[in-house]
Image (spheres, rainbow, N blue to C red):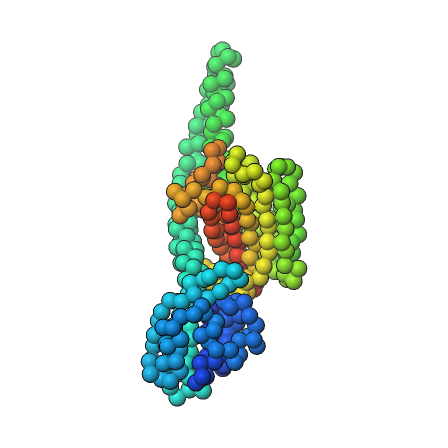
Amino acid sequence: MNSVEAFDLLATTVLLLNQNGEVAQANAAAEVMFGRSRRSLIGWPAAYLFERDAALEQSFRQACSGAVDDCRQFAHTRRGADSVEVSVTSIALLGRPWAALIEVKDIEQRVLVDRSIRLVDEIETQHELLRNLAHEVKNPLGGLRGAAQLLESELPDPALQEYTQVIISEADRLQALVDRLAAPQRMPVQWQSVNIHEVCERVCALVRAEFRTVALQRDYDASMPEFRADPARLMQALLNVVRNAAQVLTGSAQVASPHITIKTRVARQVLLRHKQHRMAVVVSVLDNGPGVPETIQDRIFHPLVTGRDGGTGLGLSLAQDFVQQHGGVIEFDSKPGHTEFRLMLPLESL
């Protein structure tokens, strides 16, 4: 593998410049960063890929002439209609076939990656604590239920059985909650070939039947290949996310025309759970609801955390757990009027 091929394995955008400051080589991440094919990038002045910035242009000239070894600064590039802030590092390459190397990092994406990695570690710790707690609670619950049944059989007045029935029903409810907390790790993942759009369609059918006032829209990438996954867990994870969005929309009187969009795309050079993947499946769930409350945004995937009245705080936690079992992660961005949850899963077999 030569150096140019090695650059394609990086999630960071890398441009190799000639002495005139023109792009001589670009890696795969550069195509995603600038929304252009590698062929169209070759021969293009590197400074033209960014919004006009005299300091940046000077850094590129100095790096290409060997006047500066290493210079890091912030700049802006266009991504569709948006201006995106990026970190740009210019490195002189003395005695190499190229004059300079330019490294470009999406600041927002780096923040999301760091947040996802931190979230995975936090959730794994919390789930371990909850599993231990569930184990400790199950035995006393069983004893409590058994004692209530024995007491019920000894009561002389049948009317008093109402109280023992309350004890038994509450013990059963708590047992069910404990089982749900411990359930995700009980059964091994059932790997098989999955068509993600079949999963999306099944979820749409279920949500449409339950929430008739919410419009469902689909934006699928028809070129999406099949990949290895557990279809039942994948469907449950997506269903939990879409149902959560629908419940928020129907519970908010401020949303005049509630709608949810399910979008599928293929992402390249994605970092998931400390591991770099060449390609990943991204299933986005977008809604026009009030957004995730700021007070719980850092804890939205933690067990028993909810921003909705009557919510259990288990739906998104279980969805994150199921996706993590596939080597992926769920990310989100939220503001009033626009919330997006992204289920990101590696296309390569684990």
Left or right, 241 with respect to 141, comes to right
Left or right, 136 with respect to 161, comes to left
Choose top left, top right, bottom left or bottom right for residue 345: bottom right
Q: Which residue is depicted at the point 50% across and 30% down?
A: 172
Q: Nearer the viewer, residue 341 or 227?
A: 341
Is 25 situated above or below 262?
Answer: below
**Residue 66: where, in percent of width, then height?**
36, 84
Q: Nearer the viewer, residue 268 or 228?
A: 268
Is there any visible trace of residue 271 in the rendered image?
A: yes
Q: Nearer the viewer, residue 247 or 194?
A: 247
Q: Which residue is depicted at the point 43% across and 28% down?
A: 144
**Residue 225: where, in percent of width, then height?**
64, 62
Is there any visible trace of residue 277 in the rendered image?
A: no
Q: Which residue is depicted at the point 37% across and 76% down?
A: 59
Q: Which residue is depicted at the point 65% across and 62% down?
A: 223
So how many labels did they put on this image? 0
**Residue 164: where, in percent of width, then height?**
47, 20
Choose top left, top right, bottom left or bottom right for residue 105: bottom left
Is 210 situated above or below 204?
Answer: above
Left or right, 58 with respect to 165, comes to left
The C terminus sits in image quarter: bottom right
